[in-house]
Image: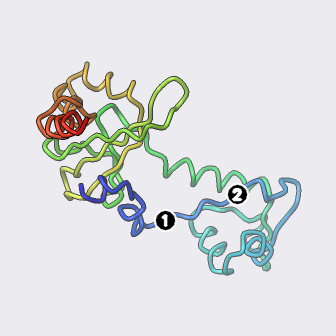
Amino acid sequence: TSLLNSGNLSLLTKNMPKKQVYNHRLIKSRRTYTLQELAEVFGLHVATPQLWLKQGLKPIESTRKPYLIRGEEIIRFLKETRQKRKHSLKPGEFFCIICREPRCGKSETLAIKRTNKTLGNTQQVILLANCEVCNRRMILFSSDRKIKEWQESKLIPSELEAVLFGYDNHSLNTGLTRGVENEN
């Protein structure tokens, strides 16, 4: 939580593995590509498009080399692989980067931080919790409206919001306000 309080979330996410997302709009659908041309379009090593062939990218003729692949087939393959990696989260779930699955967080490690950034008519909120399987820290960017929905469905205790969102009249601030009054 000290990283969270310092406001530096990049330290929490720095060592997370990143999957490459390829821009399928760079591919022309009515053109054919060799593996070398495909690697050049995305700035990759030739081995990556060769791996794509093993993962389901279909060439025009698999018996002749160099392999020629239709642009529309490449676009389909890239969209399909991107869609496979997406996971929809149910209320109360986070995405664990270690388990690579949607997981519920441990309720005793749940923390809420307001970022004071607006998302339309709502405020952005960062939820943090530890994975119940691998105990790794999970982050979920959400809104204060979602927090209220989670509280109504009893996924978040309602007293947690008062403590973490800030309550100006707690005992630590009373000494500060008294000191200001005495100086005047």
Q: Residue at x 88, y 60 (%)?
A: 31
Report x, y in % for residue 7: 37, 54
Report x, y in % for residue 30: 88, 54
Of residue 16 and residue 169, the one placed in the foreground of this image is: 169
* Amino acid type shown at disc 1: Lys
Instruction: Give the residue number, with chain letter if any, for mark 2.
Output: 23
In the rendered image of this protein, does residue 148 appear above or below residue 89? above
Report x, y in % for residue 9: 39, 57
The residues tagged by marks 1 and 2 sit, at their Cα atoms, a distance apart of 15 Å
In the rendered image of this protein, does residue 7 appear above or below residue 66? above
Taking 134 as reference, is 148 left or right? right
Instruction: Give the residue number, with chain letter if any, for mark 1.
Output: 18
Q: Label 1: how many residues lie within 10 Å, few (<14), some (14-19) or many (20+)?
A: few
Report x, y in % for residue 95: 36, 48
Q: Secondary structure at mark 1?
A: loop
Q: Secondary structure at mark 2?
A: loop
Q: Residue furthest top?
A: 152
Taking 7 as reference, is 163 left or right? left
Q: Label 2: how many residues lie within 10 Å, few (<14), some (14-19) or many (20+)?
A: few
